[in-house]
């Protein structure tokens, strides 16, 4: 029986548990384990599976998901890679953010959006409110954000605060995953409130990612690199992987070989010429990639 295609599914656990068709991209995990920068930004156009791939990383590395993650990777490339890589599964406190839904029309609306977003994020991690492991004053600050009562200054350093608390609670630094980091910036540019947005986001990211002992490593995705305002200035060991680079070239999107196998598995090989005409035409590094 043919597997269903995961149309609109961006959660890796849901995809695997419901046995959807999956093009195995878990070798990306091996590559990160073998060689990652402190902060890696991977820029790709829209509709290349960035959110699903970041979800995959979350379920593999997250100590919070350790009890459920093993079967999700059964039979995949990362399991076949060997015990060295399996020992990395479920070993990291992970913070996963997706900023793709920041589509507000004014800075006031976006600031309220941030307040709600951060409250929801903090409520996902209420386990760290443990006075025996975490400094009490941090717990007080946590509570304000979780209740949606934080001011702009507190929100701009909220990610760094959560990382500090998770480091103290779990006893090891944090892996940060940020999907579509540039979506709020693009929206702000198009709606005329770029300056306050970029100021906020610069502080939000730099406080978390620059010289932070609470950070193990971070992976960010986006459509573009925001260079004009030096949003990433001063970050040590910062690696930008654009569509022109060789690093991770075949992780996002599908290679011609993967598309051919998909068509064969779905008994739709006759559609390959149309698929090529509609979805081919991208080149990442030296790899030809389908959208």
Image (cartoon, rainbow, N blue to C red):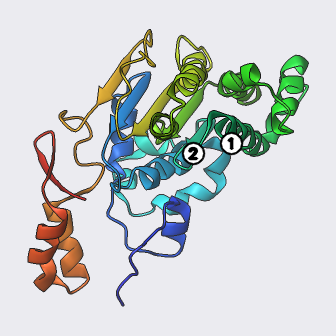
Is 218 located above or below residue 269 in the figure? above
Q: Where is residue 138 in the image (x, y as percent from the top left)?
A: 83, 21
The answer to which image quadrant residue 226 occupies is top left
Q: Position of residue 34 (x, y in %)?
A: 34, 32
Report if residue 171 is visible in the image.
no
Q: In this view, does 61 lie to the left or right of 82?
A: right
Q: Earlier in the sequence, mark 2 or mark 1?
A: 2
Q: Position of residue 3 (x, y in %)?
A: 38, 82
Residue sitting at x 15%, y 61%: 280
Mark 1 = which residue?
113
Quadrant assignment for the N terminus: bottom left
Secondary element under disc 1, as helix, strand or loop, is helix
The answer to which image quadrant residue 49 occupies is bottom left
State yes or no: discs 2 and 1 in contact (Cβ < 8 Å).
yes
**Label 2 environment density (alpha carbons within 10 Å; few <14, some 14–19, many ≥20):** many
Mark 2 = which residue?
102
Quadrant assignment for the C terminus: bottom left
Secondary element under disc 2, as helix, strand or loop, is loop
Checking the image for residue 137, the label placed there is: none
């Amino acid at each position: 029986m043919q597997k269903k295609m995961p149309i609109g599914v961006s959660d890796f656990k849901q995809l695997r548990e419901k046995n959807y068709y999956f093009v195995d991209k878990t070798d990306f995990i091996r590559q990160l384990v073998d060689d990652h920068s402190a902060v890696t930004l991977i820029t790709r156009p829209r509709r290349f599976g960035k959110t699903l791939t970041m979800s995959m990383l979350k379920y593999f590395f997250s100590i919070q998901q350790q009890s459920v993650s093993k079967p999700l990777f059964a039979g995949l490339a990362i399991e076949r890679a060997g015990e060295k890589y399996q020992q990395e599964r479920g070993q990291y406190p992970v913070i996963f953010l997706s900023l793709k839904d920041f589509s507000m029309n004014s800075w006031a609306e976006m600031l309220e959006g941030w307040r709600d977003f951060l409250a929801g994020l903090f409520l996902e991690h209420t386990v760290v409110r443990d006075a025996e492991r975490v400094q009490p004053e941090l717990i007080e600050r946590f509570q304000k954000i979780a209740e949606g009562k934080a001011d702009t200054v507190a929100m701009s350093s909220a990610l760094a605060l959560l990382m500090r608390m998770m480091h103290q609670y779990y006893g090891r630094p944090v892996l940060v995953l940020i999907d579509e980091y540039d979506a709020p910036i693009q929206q702000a540019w198009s709606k005329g409130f770029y300056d306050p947005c970029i100021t906020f986001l610069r502080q939000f990211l730099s406080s978390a990612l620059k010289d932070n002992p609470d950070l193990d490593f971070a992976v960010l995705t986006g459509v573009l690199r925001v260079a004009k305002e030096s949003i990433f200035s001063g970050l040590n060991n910062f690696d930008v992987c654009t569509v022109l680079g060789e690093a991770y070239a075949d992780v996002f999107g599908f290679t011609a070989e993967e598309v051919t196998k998909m068509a064969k598995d779905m008994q739709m090989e006759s559609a390959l010429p149309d698929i090529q005409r509609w979805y081919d035409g991208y080149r990442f590094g030296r790899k030809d990639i389908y959208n």
